[in-house]
Amino acid sequence: MTILRPFLLALATLVTFTVATAQTPGGTLTAAWSDTPGLDPHATTAYNSFQVLQQTLDTLVELDANLEPVPALAESWSLSDDGLVWTFELRDDVTFSNGRAFTADDVVYTYERMLDPDVSGNTWRLSEVASVEADGAHTVRFTLNAPNAGFLAKLGSGAPFGIIARESVEAGTIDAQGPIGTGPFVITDFQPGTSITLERNDAYWRTDADGTPLPYLDGLQLDIIPDPSVKRSALVSGDVDWSLTVPLQSVEELEARDDVVVDATPAPSYHYIGLNTEVEPLDDVRVRRAIAEAIDREQIAEAATFGTGTATQDPIPSTSQWAIDYAPYGGDLDAARALLEEAGVADGFAIDLMATTAYPEDIRAAQVIQAQLAPLGIDVTIDTREFGDWLEQQAQGTYDTLILSWLVLLDPDDFFYAQHKSDGAFNVTGYENETLDDLLLRGRAETAFPDRYAIYEQVNREIVRDAPFIYLYNPANIQAYVPAVEGYAARADQTIRFVETWLND
């Protein structure tokens, strides 16, 4: 049963209706959160940490409801004729939460720190940047190594790009207390594994359309509850107002309740199997194609997401303007057997499929994949690991196949470059394709939509045919909250912000 499309349309109608009432300033929103490893936006790569930092940091530009860049800390911008220099004119009326004025030097400091590999785990996100320079107090210039059509949207894609004050780094408190930012809230207490408390930033620079200062809320109380089932219980019992996640098997039940709003949107992300192209027999493209041919993605998506995800053979969701919908595999076991015979492994072989306990949906998917490949004589052992260990084995290349997701993808470059370019920062499969490398560079430089789309259509076909990744499904981005929570809607870019949220008690 695939319920995503009508389910999301109904929810979109509901959310549009609920935000129509007058705002009620004040109050503290209590949220069921997930484990947050640290609060340094450059050192961490954790989604849960980024979503906390979304409440405290602003970016130069931000993405509107249509995922188009609009002004934030930068009032305007321009691009040089050669596509290499982006110039941003900054607001001159912004202060950090400690009262100090925000200037161009803070932008330079932030991005130079992000680009420092000795500090940052997010350097790869700005691999195209050659330099960042201030020109006076309110002008910043980024010089790129090569044109990149997706650069502007990238700067608005969440907390890793948020501007920080150097004071929190110099004090040595950035990971434990979070950075000093210009955002709507300030972190006042962080108890790892237990809770995070945020209070309203009274110096925040924004107002709503009527001139009312933002944010409306007095604060946020984020209770760390790792188990989604316990999150659900806390929500329906009224112990929390809002939940970061809910058990996917509970979505239909929660949607039917009058005391819960289930808010969902298709997520710009995908779940996949990664195949190590440097180990036998996976180094043979025919073997990888046989696996891609044999699996039933509909069955995998149903088991993994309880009907909330959409099966796919390529990565970009159908809701994106960049969607390609290339589906060359028909689920034909005889065709898969023929490919294995051509590759000289008709009798089958044994492989490990590495999954992490951090994502139960991937373990459920792995179990289905294990059963689906058995008729081909492919003996799959599910290697289940804690996430830290999973990441270490991935980085070292000590695996046969693995399963995970890739999140917050807006520009087509996000879907492909880091994981599939021969020297990409997250190319852990060992896949190399000179034709693809050239296409990826051309895609970054091209600005005309039709021409750029045609390039990424070729990119998509190369990867799906060579199958270093086998794409499984696109998930939904789902949050749930009590009806008293208004002015909030799940976003297609998976960012979470409570700047215009209020409690209608």
Image (cartoon, helix red, strand yellow):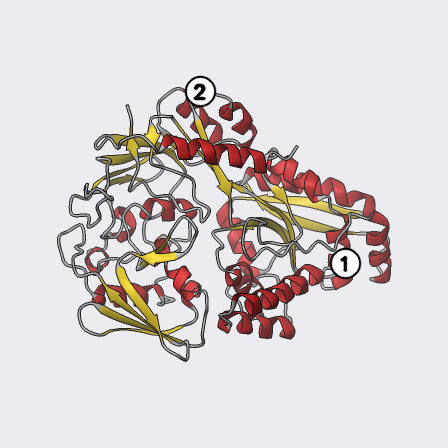
Identify residue type, mark 2.
Answer: Asp
Q: In this view, does 4 lie above or below 129?
A: above
| Whole-percent x, y for residue 189 in the image | 24, 39
Q: Is residue 59 left or right of residue 311?
A: left
Residue 258 is marked as 2
In this view, the residue in front, 33 or 54, is 54
CA distance for labels 1 and 2: 50 Å
- For the C terminus, the quadrant is top left
- Say which of 416 and 71 sits in front: 71
32, above or below 457, in the image: above
Identify which residue is drawn at 78% across, 43% down: 374
Amino acid type, mark 1: Val
Q: What element carries label 2?
A: loop
The kind of secondary structure element at disc 1 is helix
Q: Where is residue 44 in the image (x, y as percent from the top left)?
A: 38, 53
Direction from residue 175 to residue 468 in the image, left or right: right
Of the numbered discs 1 and 2, the one sitting upstream in the chain is: 2
Kindly indicate the quadrant of the structure image that contains residue 29. Answer: top left
Q: Can residue 277 be seen in this view?
A: no
Drawn side of residue 172 relative to residue 417, left or right:
left
**Who is closer to the viewer here, 63 or 133?**
63
Residue 428: image tag = none
Residue 312 at x, y percent in the picture: 65, 48
Image coords of residue 371 (percent x, y): 74, 40
Residue to which mark 1 is pinned: 287
Classify residue 204 as left or right of residue 298: left
Q: Is residue 128 visible?
A: yes
Image quadrant containing the N terminus: top right
**Badge nearest the viewer, 1 or 2:** 2
* Within-10-Å neighbours for mark 1: few <14, some 14–19, many 20+: many
